[in-house]
Image: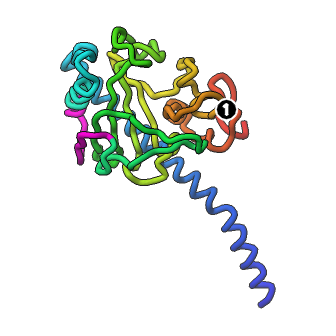
Amino acid sequence: MAEVLITLGIIGIVIAMTLPGLLGRYQERVTITKLKQTYSILSQAFSMAISEYGTIENWCNIDEGREVCADIIKERAGKYIKKVLDCNSAWKKACFAGGYGNRFNNGVIGGYGQTAFVMANGVSVSIKASNGDGFTGSWCAGNIRQGGYQNVCGYIYVDINAQGGPNIDGRDFFAFKIYRDGIVPQGEEKNNVWVETFENQCLGKGYYNGSAACTAWVLYNENMDYLHCDDLSWDGKRKCGR
């Protein structure tokens, strides 16, 4: 009997040590799948809206107000998305959590998006109309093949489980950039401006303010290994342990 109890105790310890890791990896797979689905839905919606209305720089005049443009972008692309909830403000509790943090505990993410909704798959979507540092003269002049910090039409921020936790950048909070001819995930290899590089913004090796620059990594590499090792790079190691 004593030997059985000892064996059971050892098994319990092993389970207690390994179960959190297994659950964590399972949740990562769920997040990856949900983010890929969300990217597909949003990309298709923007593609159809552009086919109907023309490229996005013609949808509105950014000088008349970012909120106006955000509403128009949501209305035109959103007509091709099945929604379960619409919000006037991205940070209303009905659509998003009250606040978001970053993985390095050195700040709180805030001020993102001007309008929002929740898709049928349970993902909250916030749309922000803006151009890089805010220079409206080059607003919406770039395209999805060009990339870069300037010339964008705006940003899309998503929470893959809406109000559910952990509400942390790179875990359940991600972003896309809007160009005149479509959308791309934030943090692509070609995004080499210091405020949105993968190394700085996702791995936290430099300036970090939570720009959700892990998005491209998750979609293109189909892993969230930046949570487990910090020596990843677009031109080198793409997965922990390799």
Q: Which residue is the site of mark 1?
A: 232
Residue for point 60% across, 28% down = 207
Q: Position of residue 185 (x, y in %)?
A: 45, 28
Residue 201 location, quadrant? top right
Residue with the most extreme right position: 3
Q: Position of residue 100 (x, y in %)?
A: 46, 44
| Residue 215 appears in the picture as rendered | no
Residue shown at 43% from the left, 38% from the top: 110
Q: Secondary structure at mark 1?
A: loop
- The foreground one among 199 and 237 is 199
Q: Which residues are magenta?
A: 77-90
Q: Quadrant of residue 224?
A: top right
Closer-to-camera residue (170/150)? 150
Left or right: residue 62 compared with residue 229: left
Query: In the picture provided, is 139 more to the left or to the right than 208?
Result: left
User: In which quadrant is the C terminus drawn?
Assistant: top right
Tell whether position 80 is magenta.
yes
User: Which quarter of the figure is the N terminus placed in?
Assistant: bottom right
Given the image, on which type of amino acid does mark 1 rest?
A: Leu
Q: Does any portion of residue 152 appear in the rendered image?
A: yes
- Quick check: is 99 in the magenta stretch? no
